[in-house]
Amino acid sequence: MARIAVIGAGMGAMAAAARLAVAGHRVTVYERTDTYGGGVRRFTREGFSFDTGPGLLPLPAVWRDLFVKTGKEPLEECVELTQVDPAARHVFADGTRVSLPNASRAGVVAALDAALGGGAGTRWGDFLVRAREAWDRTRRPLLEEPLWADWRVLAEREPYPAVPRRRRLRTRTASTLAEVGALELADPRLAALLESHALAWGLDPRTTPASAAVLPYMEHAFGLWYVRGGLRELARAVYERCLARRVEFVFGAEVTAVVEKDGRAAGVETADGTVAEAEHVVAGVDPVRLAGLAGRPPWAEGEVGADAAAAGAAGAGRFTVLLALRGAREADAAHRTVVHSPDRPAELDLLAGRTPSAAVRPTVTVLRPDDAALRPDGGHESVVVSAAVPVGDGHGWTSEEGRERLADRVLAAAEAAVPGLRERVLWREVRTPADTAAETGVGSGAVPWPALAAGDGRFLRPGNTTGRPGLFAVGGWAQPGGGLPHAGMSGALVAGLIVEGPRFRGSQ
């Protein structure tokens, strides 16, 4: 039985802790804040509750597997899962609306044909077939296995199948997500539907590799699920599973250093000077913070992790407006509505940091869960509206005035999803990447995207093992990247590497 110190109580870190405890190890989690969950938090006020992190759960099989492997009670006995239908309602820039059924290819094809015409559904269905091919090629190396030693193979090979298209006397194949939309979908609304899956992570489709086609495919193939009471309930269930497996949590304990002895990680030191010895250290932090804790980047020069530590916690953050509304939710309201930006070039410039965010109306996601646990009574409704924004200084949302202006623009978009929105608002709470930074410890407030193949490795995440023996990386900033399914799988990968050793190759 080994002593294992886990830095952070995020979802990936707790998933690793529970699995390691079941394997017989003595696990202690050190969390700098006063609660668990990382970015999976809840905001409550005056009888209203809101998820402040992710609001929907794709690929719940990852978390089902965790509960099967760590105890007798399956996931469904610990939380109430419901499938969201429709999966999303989309409002395009020209005013066209379409509701897409959950996990039904035939239903999606029919809905798109009816709303967009011109064989749009068939083209989208054909795209999903190609996206499945990309998924089949990358599922194991990018989701179920530790990062390959020869990771450059993943960086250089585009798994999305080449579909030659002849345009202007030239034959072209798509290498970016934007090119997939332009060359293969032949409708700006279908292209917007495709690109919205990248924009949700703050990724620019003009530079995001075509392999990002796996993002809409995952949603289509495995469906979207909601946890009754909000996604915070999933975090609670995982935390309680850890406690049941005798994982110890120390809250309010900020780790300031990874202790090294004889060239390997040998424990952690906290802000009060306490040193806790351990045979293994599992770090659920971003590469920049991990490099600081370790005294230097713990990955070899030229590796993905070293590049990530040098570049900082890159990515976009989330600008969120929590709305307490008077009036009941209408019966036919969609759980999720995506309202597309009327100005694609300006939105992409925003994500690239070239346009003040208060001057742009970005693509927004509106979540309206039909959940009595989130509202004081049936005469009210809680709604979450969010958009991806650049992180760092100098953007419109970083000042109080600019933050409120951007909130007004975001709510103007949300009116397409919530009838009579402005007249219904009792109060609103505005959250920016600065709030994410305070909760997660990621200085930039960025939210990590899922690892993607191709793109010269710029969309990969550092491996779970590091160049320092005994030190492991877990969570959204490590292989296989951001998102709840990926965080859960990172916990499985780290636990496998510690229990089975470096020969561990992932779930079979």
Image (cartoon, rainbow, N blue to C red):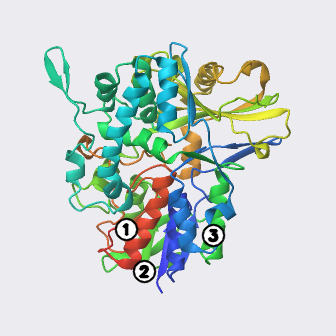
Residue 206: image location, x then y, percent: 32, 28
Q: Residues within 10 Å of mark 2 (few under 14, many from 20)?
A: some
First of labels 2, 1 by sequence position: 2
Q: Residue at x 32, y 51 (%)?
A: 136
First of labels 3, 1 by sequence position: 3
Residue underneath mark 2: 279
Q: Residue at x 35, y 53 (%)?
A: 139
Q: Quadrant of the C terminus?
A: bottom left
Q: Secondary structure at mark 1?
A: loop
Question: Contact, CB < 8 Å: mark 2 with mark 3?
Answer: no
What residue type is disc 3 on? Arg
Residue underneath mark 1: 508
What residue type is disc 2 on? Glu
What residue type is disc 1 on? Gln
Q: Is residue 429 left or right of residue 98?
A: right
Q: Is residue 15 left or right of residue 423?
A: left
First of labels 2, 3 by sequence position: 3
Residue underneath mark 3: 241
Q: Residue at x 77, y 34 (%)?
A: 381
Q: Quadrant of residue 473?
A: bottom left
Residue 278: image location, x then y, percent: 46, 79
Question: Contact, CB < 8 Å: mark 3 with mark 1?
Answer: no
Residue 149 vs residue 29, the one in the foreground: 149
